[in-house]
Image: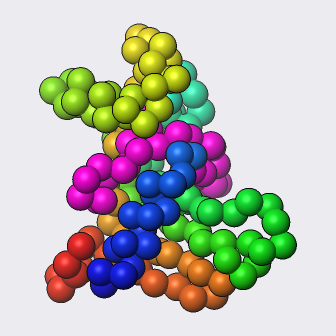
Amino acid sequence: MDTLRQQIIDLLSTQSLGVLATSAKGHPYTSLVGFVVTDQLDELLFATHRATRKFGYLQADPRVSLLIDSRSNQVEDFREAVALSAIGTAREVPPEQRDRLRQLFLAHHPYLAEFVHSPGCALCLIKVQRYSLVQRFQDVLELDFDAPHSTP
């Protein structure tokens, strides 16, 4: 479990973009988002404008998946690329947590300060229920935060 946890930390700390999957009316929708992980690994934070399609979809159905990967679009990716899916639910950060989480987000994405401070921006928090790490396109390892015997 410690090796898996370290692999997840390593990937999340080296990547700044992920593909957010939401759902609306029974159809998937994906968006590229900048993200940051909290210290406990069980929460991921991203920013979006409230007028976006993804935010509307989150309001209708909070279930999401965020894909983070290490690909470089080179042949080596077929042997070496790692993909991590974070599965959970997303919600807008409540006002009492906004300042602290905004600082965390901006520590990793300072170039987004103007956007994050704009009135239409929503900070959203994904409560991760499970991570699925895929290596070599077939080796799957899972870290489940909801499992009774899991020790994340």
- Is residue 22 shown in magenta? yes
Horizontally, residue 125 falls left or right of residue 112, namely left
Residue 50 position (above or below residue 59):
above
Q: Nearer the viewer, residue 29 or 71?
A: 71
What is the quadrant of the C terminus in the image?
bottom left
- Is residue 4 shown in magenta? no
User: Residue drawn 44% across and 48% down?
Assistant: 61
Which segment did they paint magenta?
18-47
Q: Position of residue 109 (x, y in %)?
A: 47, 32
Q: Position of residue 43 (x, y in %)?
A: 31, 52
Horizontally, residue 51 falls left or right of residue 138, namely left
Q: Position of residue 124 (x, y in %)?
A: 38, 37
Q: Nearer the viewer, residue 26 or 126?
A: 126
Where on the picture, by quarter, is residue 28? bottom right
User: Residue drawn 31% across and 35% down?
Assistant: 104
Q: Main secondary structure of the magenta part?
A: strand
